[in-house]
Amino acid sequence: MKCGVAVWNWLEPPRTLVSFVEELLDEGFEAISMQPRQILGLDEAELADLNALLDEHAMPVTIHAAVTQFPSELLQGLLERLGPRLYATTFDGSQMWTPFGRRWDAAGMVQTLLMVDKVGAETGVLFGIEDFPIDGEALAEFAEDLRPVLDNPRWGMLVDIGHLNLRRHGAGYFGCMSVAENIARLAAPIIEVHVHDNPGDRDAHMPLGTGTLDYAEAAGALRGRGFDGISTIEVCPGLHDRRPADVWATRAESLRLWREAWEAAE
């Protein structure tokens, strides 16, 4: 497992992406997660400096985006700029209205995944949806829509353990199970994990240890099922009414706590 960080929650002018990645390396991070605009907005000199830094430290990149706003041209542009440094693309899922309420648009999401499969075949980029399918029940419900990707070795899912904490506090179906039981029920290979905390009633993206998530249990359960992808610290100061500059150290502290929990789970 490598530990990364979502840079979009922290990067503010005048700090540049390259200088920020250098800071993250000093803090012990081994991977970075970005939004497409952060790569596509770099000029050629900045891109060259970034790629040199990524290569020097064998630092993979994950891209996180909305599944409904990710055309093939966008992925092609990212691959032209990052090449094999792009480890995975993961997506916020999409839903649609039905006569029975809102429902995952599995068929629509799979079309984007199939595009990534085709366009990213040469470099082998991985792909998946955040928190979908959440368990075997969901997999069975959407099996027909998911059939084109089910046997693809590059398909998986992103698991957000902060969202898992919200589900346990806000939905009886998930709340009657422990953190470990929720993780054991996940129905797809895990590509990436988003790591952050919250009080259980709102998606505050707080530092680890400041909310109600039993992150040590989560680390143990993930390690127990053989997770070996990227754990991305997704603390977002703005979502818990803080400025990045005022809580700068909480990023590295969350990394420390997550690594300690991971090692303790051996």
Image: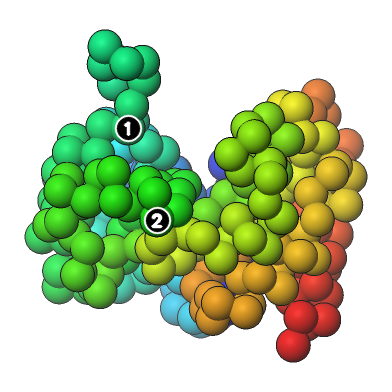
Taking the image as drawn, is residue 63 in sight?
no
Q: Earlier in the sequence, mark 2 or mark 1?
A: 1
Q: Position of residue 146 (x, y in %)?
A: 20, 51
Residue 62 falls left or right of residue 83: right
Is the image coloured rainbow, by chain, by secondary structure, or in one colour? rainbow
Q: Furthest-bottom residue in view?
A: 266
Q: 121 or 20: nearer the eye? A: 121
Q: Mark 1 packing: few (<14 Cα in 10 Å), some, or many (20+)?
A: some
The amino acid pointed to by label 2 is Gly
Quarter holding the N terminus is bottom right
Measured in 3D between alpha carbons, the distance from the residue under mark 2 to the one under mark 1, in whole angstroms, is 15 Å
Q: In the rendered view, tell whether residue 17 sits above or below residue 29.
A: above
Q: Write the residue at 70% across / 56% down.
A: 179
Which is nearer the eye, 177 or 215? 177
Q: Tag 1: residue type?
A: Trp
Residue named by callout 1: 104
The answer to whether 237 is drawn above or below residue 137 in the figure is above
**Count of all numbered marks drawn on residues in the image:** 2
What residue is disc 2 on?
136
Q: Which residue corresponds to the image point at 70% horizontal and 69% vertical from the top-left?
A: 219
Q: Residue at x 76, y 65 (%)?
A: 217
In the image, residue 108 lies at what x, y percent?
Answer: 18, 35
Of circles 2 and 1, the one toward us is: 2
